[in-house]
């Protein structure tokens, strides 16, 4: 038993002699800086959503590689050399007394603890908007005046014009959203001494939003190059200042009204579909596959009616969804399935064919449902069962 602590002590000493501890600590610090940098630039540079996760995973996988390499090799003035093992310590050198704690040990330990604390919310962070989706609470939204970054004061009028337009677009959905009025928002901004909206910072916008009891706020700007106008907006968490999503439209300055409407619609659609998605049961909360909240709302009505076996109403709702968005593949599939429920097999076949033609545009789960429904008309019962078995491999709770 007495030999075990001695072995551990020698192992720890060897780790330090080979500079493994120092290299690992430096790697952890560098990894954190890289992760922070990627997190901060991913949104403005429009990187894909998965890029931050990929970087974190690469840093994690690189950790054991760095540790092993630092154990085997050492960097010397003569270059990279293999670290030679030390001779076994003699009896005099292998005393049982405890080694004094060094300042470097304390610094490394503190560095590891701090990095772990800072990395934890990055890896396991739960989006607050996700929590709002899960609740019955309406999402409260504040819209900031847009920043005029054109260096042309004639565009100042559009700062509040864009703000008003976005508020108007969102206010039509009072059952899902609570939209703060521009007067209250701008009054609080002026109270902070801001007269030029171009100097409005996300920190101040977040503080104003919290005073308005808003969950999220819209923060945007206007940029001009020649005759080209770019309108940008971000959907930001009022509490954490995390950016959920960014939006951008470009066009000629003579089309400013069209650009404003386009940007307002993008923000509106993002928030409304976000909210409507969570009216579905948890097992059905996949991407709605439409950019139209009106079409998606009719789809939800149809899905609810079909679950009550009110097939006539369900058929009408799915048809209205397709009248708004003819490329809504899931509504096409559900319309076919509803026609089957009604015994309208000829019509069901037509809708099934249309959904089947677009099956490669949808996620795998939806694709398998479309293929299974299509098999009702063209394939054998055994092939139909095959699609269901594939689906059950993905979701074993499928009824």
Image (tube, rainbow, N blue to C red):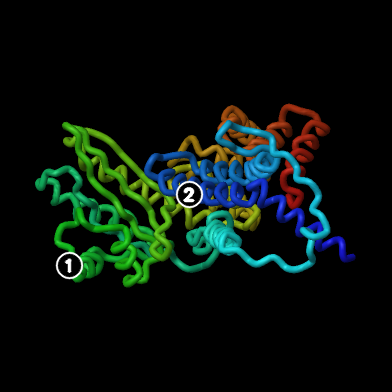
Q: State the image coordinates of residue 15 (x, y, percent, origin top left).
A: 69, 50
Q: Residue at x 40, y 59 (%)?
A: 241
Residue mark closest to the camera, 2 vs 1: 2
Q: Residue at x 25, y 45 (%)?
A: 260
Which of pointers 2 and 1 lies earlier in the amino acid sequence? 2
Q: Is there any visible trace of residue 92 in the rendered image? A: yes
Residue 337, numbered label:
none
Between residue 98 and residue 40, name the one nearer to us: 98
The residue that mark 2 highlights is 33
Say above or below: 330 vs 92: above
**SS at mark 2 in the image:** helix
Q: State the image coordinates of residue 6 (x, y, percent, origin top left).
A: 81, 60
Residue density around tag 1, few if under 14, some if 14–19, many if 20 or more, within 10 Å: few
Residue 193, numbered label:
1
Total numbered circles: 2
Residue density around tag 2, few if under 14, some if 14–19, many if 20 or more, within 10 Å: few
Q: State the image coordinates of residue 42 (x, y, percent, origin top left).
A: 43, 43
Say above or below: 376 vs 294: above
Q: Quadrant of residue 252?
A: top left
Between residue 135 and residue 53, name the one nearer to us: 53
In this view, the residue farthest toward the right is 1
Q: Viewed as shown, does residue 278 lie left or right of 65?
A: left
Q: Is there any visible trace of residue 343 in the rendered image? A: no
């Amino acid at each position: 038993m007495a030999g075990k602590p001695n072995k551990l002590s020698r192992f720890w000493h060897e780790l330090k002699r080979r500079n493994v501890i120092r290299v690992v600590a430096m790697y952890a610090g560098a990894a954190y800086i890289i992760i922070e940098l990627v997190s901060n630039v991913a949104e403005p540079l429009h990187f894909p959503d998965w890029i931050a996760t990929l970087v974190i995973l690469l840093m994690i996988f690189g950790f054991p590689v760095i540790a092993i390499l630092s154990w085997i090799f050492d960097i010397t003035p003569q270059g990279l050399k293999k670290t030679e093992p030390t001779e076994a310590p003699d009896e005099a050198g292998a005393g049982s007394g405890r080694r004094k704690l060094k300042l470097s040990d304390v610094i490394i330990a503190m560095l590891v603890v701090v990095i772990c604390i800072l990395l934890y919310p990055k890896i396991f962070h739960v989006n607050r908007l996700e929590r709002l989706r899960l609740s019955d609470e309406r999402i409260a939204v504040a819209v900031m005046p847009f920043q005029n970054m054109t260096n042309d004061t004639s565009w100042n009028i559009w700062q509040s014009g864009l703000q008003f337009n976005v508020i108007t677009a969102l206010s039509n959905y009072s059952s899902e959203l609570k939209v703060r009025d521009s007067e209250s928002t701008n009054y609080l901004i002026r109270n902070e001494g801001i007269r030029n909206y171009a100097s409005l910072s996300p920190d101040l916008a977040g503080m104003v939003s919290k005073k308005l009891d808003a969950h999220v706020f819209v923060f945007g700007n206007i940029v001009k190059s020649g005759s080209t106008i770019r309108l940008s907006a971000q959907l930001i968490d009022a509490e954490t200042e995390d950016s959920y999503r960014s939006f951008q439209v470009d066009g000629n300055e003579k089309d400013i009204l069209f650009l404003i409407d386009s940007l307002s619609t993008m923000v509106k659609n993002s928030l409304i579909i976000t909210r409507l998605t969570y009216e579905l049961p948890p097992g059905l909360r996949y991407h709605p596959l439409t950019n139209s909240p009106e079409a998606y709302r009719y789809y939800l009505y149809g899905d609810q009616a079909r679950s009550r076996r009110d097939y006539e109403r369900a058929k009408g709702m799915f048809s209205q969804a397709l009248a708004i968005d003819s490329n809504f593949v899931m509504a096409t599939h559900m319309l076919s399935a509803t026609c089957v429920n009604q015994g309208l097999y000829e019509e069901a076949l037509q809708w099934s064919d249309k959904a089947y033609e677009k099956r490669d545009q949808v996620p795998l789960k939806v694709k398998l449902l479309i293929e299974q429904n299509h098999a009702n008309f063209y394939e054998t019962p055994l092939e139909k069962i095959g699609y269901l078995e594939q689906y059950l491999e993905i979701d074993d709770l499928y009824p």
